[in-house]
Image (cartoon, helix red, strand yellow):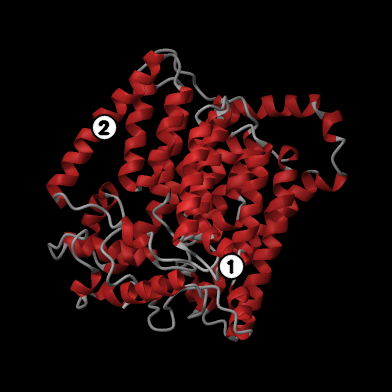
Amino acid sequence: MSDGAVAAPGLGQLEPRLERLAARGAALRGLLPQALGARTGRVALASILAAVALVVAFASSGPSILVPRSGAAFPTWEMGPLHALYGHLALSATTVDLGYSGLLLAMLLAYAAAVLAARSLSLRSVVVFAVAVNLILLIGPQLQLNDVFNYLGYARLGGLHGLNPYTHVINAESFDPVFRFSTWHNLTSPYGPLFTALSYPLAWLPLPVAYWIIKVAVVAASLGFLYCVYRCAALLGRDPRPVLLLVAANPIYIFYAVGGFHNDFFMLLPSTAAIALLLARRDRCAGAVLMLAVAVKFTAVLLLPFLLIAARPTERRLRVITGAVLAAIPLVAMSLLLFGLSLPNLSQQSSVITGFSVPNVLGILLGFGGTTEGLVRLLSLGAVVVVLVGLRRRDWVAAAGWSTLALIASVTWLMPWYIVWLLPLAALGQSRRLRAAAVAFTVFLVLTFIPETSSYLSSHGINTLSSPTDQAAASLQAKLQQ
């Protein structure tokens, strides 16, 4: 651990400082439209909270497109406590499609208004909003996808049935209660060894208890992640209000990441903490904590070269490397002990394709019908080039953000919540273009993943997966989900 640690100010200390900065910047704020003042900001945040509460209440009431596989199985312990309050709110599938799609589009506008008005809001109101969003989502069921049951499926496969989740599939436990809730029945686990090992104790608990423990853990990790974003902003001397709202008010962060209860937060919490630790000159801890993120999802290793660039002089870089190596040793030992030489199944997961991944959209625009192997290689090479160029940039946070964006753009299996990997880097970096790119990509993901888009394409006979590579990937996906 290095000397000279810098303490980030607490909420109580920072609030008066922000008020003084706001007073001095009154002339600059006057250049903004009056509509983007505190009242607009409060209305925007209240609108987002109301939308979240509405979606959670409806999702809790009974089977719908909002909760995957709820038509086949939707027990009351999965619905959450609001089910007893609202009962079943019956609406047609078309109405739900249109309503939820329209709500997400309206939330995009509220998101923009909240971010633009952030400096007119108090830090306390921003923090209360972020906590409230997470707690409202906690009491509802998982939204959009049910990866939470895949996590439990792999946990029970290894912890309860003694089968290595990196060599066996969930179909091997078809007799287990979790089987009917899970989806990737013929896919060995793509998740990191640390996450898999930590999930094993859940296998011995009743399924409803394990389900709620994961949900609570995800929300706790999400709030911890937001605190790390705040701390990074404070250490960088940045106003944390727009930084926090760029992340916490994002509709994808809300409904797809937190609402889907995805394990990405177990990667984002330590990776963002590593940035905060480096900024506080706690270099060994920064390297060690980053290895925890890598052991959850290997994607986090992308941050390591940028931490090394930021750690100057050479002595600090050596401390980061030392911390990373010291943390990696027990993590590798744990993985070998529990899973042998087996590794997460990243190859098959990267072989499936979503219709609106960047390689597929680019292939359609170029007349190839969708994804081609050449386009995938080209975009992967482009991501490598972006990383190499970024290592020469002075703003290492923004450089890491551009590299993350290039990585997301290169994957064929694009999920909406991947944008959350980018948001803290875009918010903390100095590049306005990166923030604009993050918001633009958010809009793209919302537009392409809202239910009404797939309904429209289906009703007009439009298939976004028509190239030979797409068809092969679709066959593989069907086989993995059987």
Residue 327 image label? 2
Asked if 24 appears above or below 397 in the picture, the reply is: above
> x, y (%) of residue 317?
38, 20
Q: How many marks?
A: 2
Could you tell me which quadrant the C terminus lies in? bottom left
Residue 364 image label? 1
Asked if 216 appears above or below 268 in the picture, the reply is: below
How far apart marks 2 and 1 lie (CA) works out to: 44 Å
Quarter holding residue 286: top left
Residue at the image position 42 percent from the left and 57 percent from the top: 262
Asked if 151 appears above or below 192 in the picture, the reply is: below
Residue at the image position 19 percent from the left and 73 percent from the top: 173
Given residues 453 and 101, the one toward you in this image is: 453
> x, y (%) of residue 2?
37, 16
Estimate how packed mark 2 is, as few (under 14), some (14 to 19) or many (20 or more) residues with alpha carbons within 10 Å: some
Residue at the image position 39 percent from the left and 46 percent from the top: 299
Given residues 130 and 240, the one toward you in this image is: 240
Residue at the image position 48 percent from the left and 75 percent from the top: 83
Q: Amino acid at mark 1?
A: Ile
Q: Nearer the viewer, mark 2 or mark 1?
A: 1
Task: For residue 140, say whether it is visible.
Answer: yes
Position of 295 with respect to 165 (left or right) is right
Quarter holding residue 308: top left
Task: For residue 227, say whether it is visible.
Answer: no
